[in-house]
Image (spheres, rainbow, N blue to C red):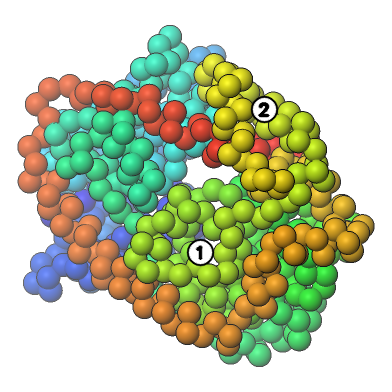
């Protein structure tokens, strides 16, 4: 079997980690007497890539090929002298086929496994798929993130580059259909959306991320002492760890709200600062606000000069999340494998797959209730309407009809409260200030959110049974071994399917993809706001 895996880069990060775990999984699923060949094709960056991976994958022969044109592009394509995406795709196709042959691969017997081809980070990739699919043994397009999911700047890049005169044709370019072209998705939500768009069930596959077991964590007392020395975090105060980069969708305002409600009873810490300059300003503004409000929050404790990931996890009493949007939601699984309970915001559209298989998220909430009269009904409605109208315009959609907006808005207001995660950043700041200035309001909010007191005290001692139960569920359903067999069988299935004999076809109802994501109930204004603006 010959597999060519394509991604923009192999830098340390979410998709790159998934690729590495795919290879570890696949190696475990291949018979000892067999050996599969894998070629990793990427743009050239591989900071943090595990160079010793081949030793961990004895059943795979792994090679790499760099094609710089596969990396992120920085233009919209086709305008202002920028390369036309079709011409770029033709050049990339030639280089990719040459790379396959150089490494001894036969294109017609090779499966091309492409990650995030339609995200908009490189506008030539969808055209590249059109050119390569008929030449190869099969194509697997794995989608981790959607440009349609409140990423209007990326969607607009794709539309401007690929279908400038006919925006309605963009789904046909992004999601081509045909024999031998298969799709992989991370969760049931995405599978449902692509199914509604008309992707055939036989070519639509659930590929949840495999979760590698945690290596032994260092002793907690050692990690806590080191944390105290490096980050001045008291060793005798409970630590709730948010193990992420602090980008906008991670909802750091809610982390600060937790800290305000805890009133010094626990330290809350986020591990990593953003690398993206456009995210950095928002992050620093939250850090500054935490200092101004004298909150027991720490930022970047895993940055250079801080502790490593395993040390931070070992030091934590519990892991937490306040994120409002995820593609897969690895933290919902990893926490339990690390022997720590997980507290914070639940994302049912993501975690539904997990809970169906028995995972218990007892200390998590779907909404953090804020009294609506603290904000004002009209103020909240206007904030939401303004943000939503702006998003729709960016996507080239008509504004929602007043009746439809009011109906959807009513679902967001439950009785006399609203979810903190549905507030824009100025309103989140307003709520935070009021909590810090009023012990009465702090008490009222804790009473309104009855789950908070228990979640704040969660640790591996008082959640030992739950940690063990959830670990077993994860090992049974998301282990490297379990996933490896699924991926192996899928590759075999794709290769056995005849290739498309004619041009690839559009999805029958491709417009449903954008419609499904752009529902008002899914809007989280903080993803669109810039705190530092």
Q: Is residue 532 visible?
A: no
Relative vertical location of residue 334 with respect to residue 339 in this rendering, above or below = above
- Position of 497 relative to 355 (above/below): above
Q: Which mark is residue 331?
A: 1
Q: Position of residue 470 (x, y in %)?
A: 42, 75
| Mark seen at residue 385 | 2
Residue at 80 percent of width and 43 percent of height: 373
Q: What residue is at 52 percent from the left and 19 percent from the top?
A: 397
**63 relative position to 339: left or right:** left
Identify the residue at image location x=82%, y=53%. Answer: 432
The Cα atoms of the two marked residues, 1 and 2, are separated by: 32 Å
The residue tagged with tag 2: helix, strand or loop? Answer: helix
Give the camera-side residue of 102 and 349. 349
Q: Position of residue 476 (x, y in %)?
A: 30, 73
Q: Is residue 82 left or right of residue 2?
A: right
Residue farthest along the right direction in this orientation: 437
Are there few (<14), some (14-19), or many (20+) residues within 10 Å of tag 2? some
Could you say where residue 146 lies in the image, as x and y percent from the top left? 44, 38
- Picture coordinates of residue 505 (x, y %)? 22, 23
Identify the residue at the far front of this view: 415
Which element is circle 1 on?
Answer: helix
């Amino acid at each position: 079997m010959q597999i060519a895996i394509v991604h923009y880069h192999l830098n340390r990060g979410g998709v790159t980690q998934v690729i590495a775990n795919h290879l570890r999984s696949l190696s475990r699923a291949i018979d000892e007497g067999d050996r599969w060949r894998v070629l990793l094709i990427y743009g050239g960056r591989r900071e943090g890539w595990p160079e010793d991976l081949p030793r961990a994958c004895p059943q795979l022969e792994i090679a790499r090929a760099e094609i710089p044109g596969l990396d992120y592009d920085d233009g919209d394509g086709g305008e202002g002298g920028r390369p036309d995406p079709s011409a770029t795709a033709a050049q990339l196709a030639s280089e990719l086929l040459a790379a396959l042959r150089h490494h001894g691969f036969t294109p017609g017997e090779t499966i091309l496994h492409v990650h995030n081809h339609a995200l908009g980070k490189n506008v030539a990739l969808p055209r590249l798929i059109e050119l390569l699919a008929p030449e190869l043994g099969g194509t697997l397009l794995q989608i981790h993130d959607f440009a349609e999911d409140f990423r209007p700047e990326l969607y607009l890049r794709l539309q401007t580059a690929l279908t400038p005169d006919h925006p309605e044709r963009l789904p046909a370019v992004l999601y081509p259909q045909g024999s031998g072209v298969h799709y992989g998705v991370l969760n049931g939500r995405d599978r449902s959306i692509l199914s509604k768009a008309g992707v055939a069930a036989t070519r639509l596959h659930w590929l949840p991320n495999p979760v590698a077991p945690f290596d032994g964590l260092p002793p907690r007392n050692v990690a806590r002492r080191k944390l105290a020395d490096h980050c001045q975090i008291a060793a005798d105060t409970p630590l709730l760890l948010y193990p992420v980069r602090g980008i906008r969708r991670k909802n750091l305002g809610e982390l600060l709200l937790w800290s305000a409600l805890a009133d010094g009873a626990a330290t809350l810490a986020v591990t990593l600062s953003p690398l993206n300059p456009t995210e950095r300003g928002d992050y620093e503004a939250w850090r500054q606000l935490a200092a101004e409000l004298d909150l027991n929050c720490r930022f970047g404790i895993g940055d250079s000069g801080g502790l490593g990931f395993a040390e931070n996890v070992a030091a934590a009493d519990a892991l937490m999340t306040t994120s409002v949007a995820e593609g897969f939601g690895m933290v919902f699984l990893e926490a339990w494998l690390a022997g720590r309970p997980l507290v914070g915001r639940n994302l049912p559209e993501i975690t539904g797959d997990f809970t169906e298989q028995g995972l218990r998220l007892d200390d998590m909430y779907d909404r953090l209730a804020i009294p609506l009269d603290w904000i004002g009904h009209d103020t909240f409605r206007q904030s939401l309407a303004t943000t939503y109208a702006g998003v729709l315009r960016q996507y080239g959609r008509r504004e929602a009809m007043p009746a439809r907006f009011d109906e959807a808005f009513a679902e967001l207001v439950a009785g006399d409260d609203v979810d903190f995660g549905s507030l824009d950043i100025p309103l989140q700041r307003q709520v935070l200030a009021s909590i810090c200035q009023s012990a009465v309001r702090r008490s009222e909010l804790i009473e309104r959110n009855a789950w908070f007191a228990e979640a704040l005290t969660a640790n591996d001692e008082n959640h030992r049974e739950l940690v063990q139960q959830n670990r077993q569920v994860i090992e049974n359903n998301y282990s490297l071994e379990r996933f490896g067999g699924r991926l192996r069988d899928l590759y075999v299935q794709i290769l056995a399917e005849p290739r498309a004999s004619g041009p690839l076809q559009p999805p029958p109802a491709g417009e449903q993809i954008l419609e499904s994501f752009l529902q008002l109930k899914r809007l989280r204004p903080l993803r669109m706001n810039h705190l530092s603006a």
